[in-house]
Image (cartoon, rainbow, N blue to C red):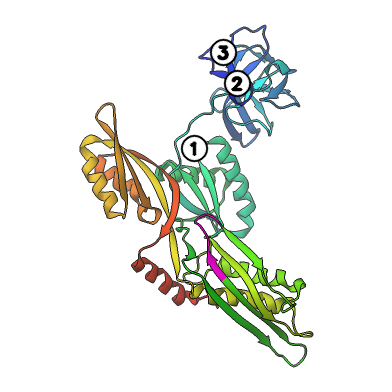
Amino acid sequence: EGNPPRCLIGEGDKAAPYAVVPDAARHVVAHVFKVIFDPFVGKLALFRIHQGTVTRDSQLFIGDGRKPFKVGHLFTLFGKEHPEVTNGIPGDIRAVAKIDDIHLDAILHDSHDEDFLHLQPSRFPLPVAGLAIRARRIQDEQRLAEALHKLLEEDPSLALEANPSTRETVLRGLSELHLRTVLDQLQARYRIELDTDKPSVAYRETITAGAQGQHRHKKQTGGAGQFGEVVLQVEPLARGAGFQFVSAVVGGAIPGALIPAVEKGVREGLAAGAIAGYPLVDLKVVVTDGKHHPVDSKEVAFVAAGRKALLAAVREAIPVVMEPIVDLEVQVPQDAIGSVTGDLAGRRGRVLGTRALPHGRMVVIAQAPLAELDEYPERLKAMTGGNASYTLELAQYEPVPESLQRDLCAAFRHGGEAD
């Protein structure tokens, strides 16, 4: 019957162990251990039966779902073949097709007595290697999205990130080799041509002081013109606080109906960045004054005035570029710890401590800028003979060194500064 999974029944702190008995006469309890997508059958969920009997007429619930599905077609697997069978008993591996709601680690059962029956969540290694991917042809973008969704269902150690600040889709896996294998599958199974690149670092901008900005947008083209003037104040907020917009305009200097246009312009400026082209975060914008014209004040004028007043204020507010800092845990042989900590120091990393493990191994606990970890898996492999692993997780954002900020700002100016 195989080793039955450690099941719990109930919710939250009230969950209690549930004993699975390999008895074909009892209610069904089965565990979905794999999901694959077959080019002919579609989505296949493979499950092991631990209790009860599953037939083609069985009505099964998925976890705490209230609506059962009818099995209909029940398969067994022999290599690439999956012939239909009539039933399955404890110990059998079976599969069902085209049930959209089934997912990895789901518990299948046939009675409401087993509602809220679930497993302890499986722990998978954190995906640390990443590649920015895109379809080479625009017409393949939707197919790529669908293919990636299927791959993520099949392989829970993959992760997909849509980074709005860099406009990249980043596929993450356990290693460079893992990702290359997945990309080969994408191209072979779905015939989608891909372009890949190293992910861009998601830098951000913020301010460290308060400042005022003002801009008058005036445009005359012979007919009706455009006119709008905005005065605003920017103030720094705590890290992670996001963005706040406040209108403190009095006396109708800017009509209330046009304040949303000012906010729209401010948000456009935040997204575009002021000094290095990265999104502005953690600041408060207070619109204090302005001017309007009874004929020429249109929404477009106050959008432009709001955006440029923001940029003017930010450039006076001692702006800085921020970079992502990650928490690192590197598991290494004890004799490699000096090389690993020295390498991290050379990457602007901070070693926070170490922890001993059995069998002569150590864990190095550190923080480092994500930008400095390019090709780190290859370097770690070279230092330890392939006998090391690591995990990383975003910790916080911190200001970049002055020299790096100068380089990023210079590249932005060279590429076309925000106006």
Q: Answer above or below: position of 130 versus 337.
A: below
| Residue that carries the numbered disc 1 in the rendered image | 157
User: For this rendering, which residue is in front, 49 or 232?
Assistant: 232
State whether residue 93 appears in this view: no
Instruction: Residue 51: give x, y in percent of width and height.
Output: 62, 12
Instruction: Give the Cα distance between marks 1 and 2.
Output: 27 Å
For the point 54% across and 49% down, the residue is: 161
Question: Of callouts 1 and 2, which one flags the residue occurring earlier in the amino acid sequence?
Answer: 2
Question: Of callouts 1 and 3, which one flags the residue occurring earlier in the amino acid sequence?
Answer: 3
User: What secondary structure is the stretch in magenta mostly built from?
Assistant: loop
Question: Of callouts 2 and 3, which one flags the residue occurring earlier in the amino acid sequence?
Answer: 2
Q: Answer above or below: position of 254 versus 338.
A: below
Query: Mark 2 belongs to which amino acid?
Result: Ala
Query: Regarding mark 3 in the picture, which secondary structure is present there?
Result: loop
Query: Mark 1 belongs to which amino acid?
Result: Ser
For the point 58% across and 26% down, the residue is: 81
Looking at the rendered image, the quarter that the N terminus falls into is top right
| Residue that carries the numbered disc 2 in the rendered image | 15
Query: Mark 3 belongs to which amino acid?
Result: Gly
Segment tinted magenta in the rendering: 234-241
Instruction: Tell whether label 3 touches label 2 (CB within 8 Å).
Output: no
Instruction: Give the Cα distance between marks 2 and 3.
Output: 26 Å
Query: Regarding mark 2 in the picture, which secondary structure is present there?
Result: loop
Crowdedness of circle 2 by 10 Å Cα count: few (<14), some, many (20+)?
some
State whether residue 65 appears in this view: yes
